[in-house]
Image (cartoon, coloured by chain):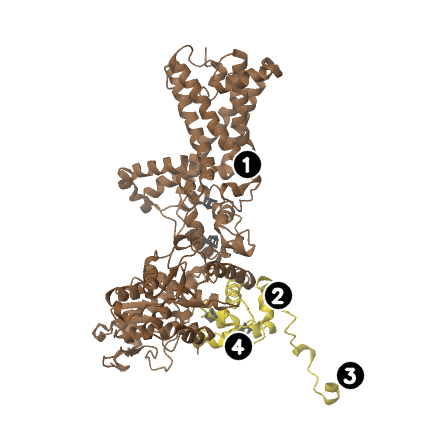
Chain colours: A brown, B yellow
Amino acid sequence: MNFSDHPPFVWPFLAGMAFIFVYLPLVYLNWLRKGKLKEFRVMPAHIFSSKTLLAVKEIFSECLLHRRIFRFNRRLGYMHMSLAFGWFLLIVVGKAETMLFTHDGFNPPYLPVFFKYFYPSGIPHTFKGYFFLTLMDLLLLFVLSGLFLAFYKRFRSRRLGMTRTTRHILPDRIALTFLWMIFPFRWFAESVTAGLAGSGGFFTLGSGKLLAGILPLDLMQEPAWWAYSVALGGFFFALPFSRYMHIFTEAVMILLKHWGMKTPERDNGYGDFELNACSRCGICTNVCQLSADAGITHSQAVYFLRDARYGLLERDTAENCFLCGRCSRACPVEIGVDELRLAARRRFAGELAAPVTGIPRGVNGQGTFPGLNTQTGSGMKSKGVAGLKVDVKEGMKGGATRDQKNGVEVLYFGGCMSHLTPGIMAATRTILEKAGISFAVLDEQETLCCGRPAMQAGLEGQAREIIARLSERIRQSGASLLLVSCPICYRVFREEYHLPIPVEHHTRYFSRLVTSRPALFHSSSLRMSYHDPCDLGRGSGIYEEPRKILRHTGTLVPVPQEREDALCCGGSLANLAITPRQRQQVTDAAYAHLTAEAPDFVVTSCPLCKKTFAAGKRPVPVIDIAEALAFSMTGDTVPTRLQKSTRELVAP
Amino acid sequence: MSTKGDKWGFQPEKSNVIVLDRPVAPLYRQLRLKVPSLASCFFCGGCSATCTASEEGMNFRVVHLLLCRGEMEKVGSLIAPCLLCGKCTLVCPRNVDTRSVVFNLKLALHELQ
Ligand code: SF4
Ligand code: SF4
Ligand code: SF4
Ligand code: SF4
Ligand code: SF4
């Protein structure tokens, strides 16, 4: 057979394939042009290293096998795998079959795709030929089974683990229609040809014989192959404008990721790969509490990424999100949605750098920090307030105050939220005093903000100014450890402050105390469920320490979704668009979840979570882990102490 | 129409009347659409009492009052020091999303410049 005279029906397929192979590289190069040259300098070192192998392994397991989706739901994983891996194998095995046949790797690109049209009986009368006929039919069945599941998912998504699925837009629907036509059409065309020739694989020949009984096959042959080719070509043309752009982009993204590119602080093109690598699988919508509890269905990761990709992003979509991290954890593509959202918020806020920041310069005008009172634990001599007086002007000049290291071990920072829940600050004091640890309180009389709320709102300039000023104060204190109650602060102190002293969240600090001096704490028969705050759990990876404390002081009651899968309390400051009512709905649902096992207390380790849960009717009280620990030290009957602390509403 | 105030000469001039329920300034109207909960503020001042930036002059209650009156000049410098820490929202007895108000105001004023 002379391959130079192609049958005309191959043209739609060839045109589509040519389009993809020219258009996609151009698009990718265009994105990469945004990056600065020096960002790429590090790349060669990564390219010629084992990282490339790791990338290939990840591409295989994620783009083809979809291992992470399997983890989420087995049926959904099978659906994605059979479509991706099955199609991939059809291409690879098909190519191998033609190469065996023509003894030429450079046979026309359409030959593997339309092989059966040209050679309905494959490689005749050999075991090899029979093997390939059977294998190709099995692969086709494999893909068709995935397609059937995809179709089934339209009506019964719950069966595939999805309570909510993505709403799709026109380009997606067009591409989807073509995609769904490809494999049934292939099966039909191969069956017609097999039925005509009277030979073929077990599946196509079987269906071909059936069809021969009811259809005039000789008239159907050409149209059937035309239809298959048009479906393929149409899909290829629609691909770059639809969600199926993810097929190739995800692979390139994984390569770039292993070669050292990151979710951008500043736009370097990698963000475009991430936006386009989203397959709109909808797993993120499925886990998002906004859709589950508050009826908000336009701002989930999938919609945010989609709108950003098409340049249609509205401010509300970027802002209506807790940045709780549940979706980025569930996302099988591991897209850095939170970072992309922050970048979008920064763009909306523009260069809004507020001229003045709100860190009080010292109330008495003498340049002293009245908040910096030194306290010492019992049994230690008080060093007095004067020891920590710092001259602002000196401090700002950098005429530092290293010599002021006066033996204070711990500098405690409550943060604004702890000022609204003074029980936490009081409990922390109690624990430190009873343990005999010397400490100073950084924000005793005035509140200071860590800067993270402004950062989450996209007000980068203002946040940086807060950070610079507050970190100066912390450096001046001369303490050897910074202790914080608020996970929001904890995270920003660790990530943005670059302090010379270690920063500890009280859960970790106190869990060490429980280990080293267990006799200080008494056990009780109280049953407690634990709420993982987003910024402490998913944000900082602290899950075990608080549980250790609770197991020591009482009985830990499990909750259905905890640790990495914990719910957000709904109070997150990162959501700037949710209405108070919707916020309350999320909070109520999370509270119901935490109290399902009827514990005596819900324990959290974040002042904002505690404050958020406190609003409304709460039969089971919510306390902070510092309070639970302080109770276990003082041996007070918890309920009486607690009634006091839950009644507190406003900072004194 | 005659009222008692009329007789005593105490009737306020029309231009001085502030009807807090009827937003007049265009920016304020937009803000009320964007953050509807602002309508339920009854100027108790709880937000201002807890404010982290009050040392620097931030006072949400005053800002809201100025907005109602359409006196926009001072608003920008008043809200500049707000750190968006969110304490005001958490203490508000009327569930006003104060933080969102200030945030949107910051962005709107920035755009106007
Ligand atoms: S963001 Fe991730 S989880 Fe959400 S639709 Fe896209 S790929 Fe799926
Ligand atoms: S970060 Fe949380 S709130 Fe935001 S979209 Fe993801 S799951 Fe929803
Ligand atoms: S709690 Fe308030 S809020 Fe936390 S410090 Fe962090 S920001 Fe300031
Ligand atoms: S606390 Fe609420 S109701 Fe009171 S003045 Fe502030 S915003 Fe208005
Ligand atoms: S968000 Fe702004 S106005 Fe509200 S308490 Fe914090 S600094 Fe004050």
In the image, the residue with mark 4 has its CB under 8 Å from the nearest atom of ligand 4 = yes
Q: Return the residue at label 4.
A: B45
Task: Confirm whether circles 1 and 3 share one chain.
Answer: no
**Side (left or right) of A634 relative to B8:** left
Determine whether the residue tagged by mark 2 lies in a helix, strand or loop: helix
Q: Amino acid at mark 2?
A: Arg
Front: mark 3 or 4: 4
Select label 1 or label 2 by which is in front.
Answer: 1
Comparing marks 2 and 4, which lies closer to the viewer? 4
Badge 2 vs badge 3, beta-carbon distance below 8 Å = no
- Residue, disc 3: B2
User: Is residue A82 something that shows in the picture?
Assistant: yes
Residue A566 in percent (x, y) is at 42, 55
Q: Chain of mark 3?
A: B
Q: Residues within 10 Å of mark 2 (few under 14, many from 20)?
A: some
Q: Amino acid at mark 4?
A: Gly
Q: Residues within 10 Å of mark 4 (few under 14, many from 20)?
A: some
In the image, what residue type sits under mark 3? Ser
Q: Amino acid at mark 1?
A: Tyr
Q: Is residue A354 above or below residue A564?
A: below
Which quadrant, please, contains the C terminus of chain A? bottom left
Q: Which residue is mark 1?
A: A152
The residue shown at (34%, 60%) is A547
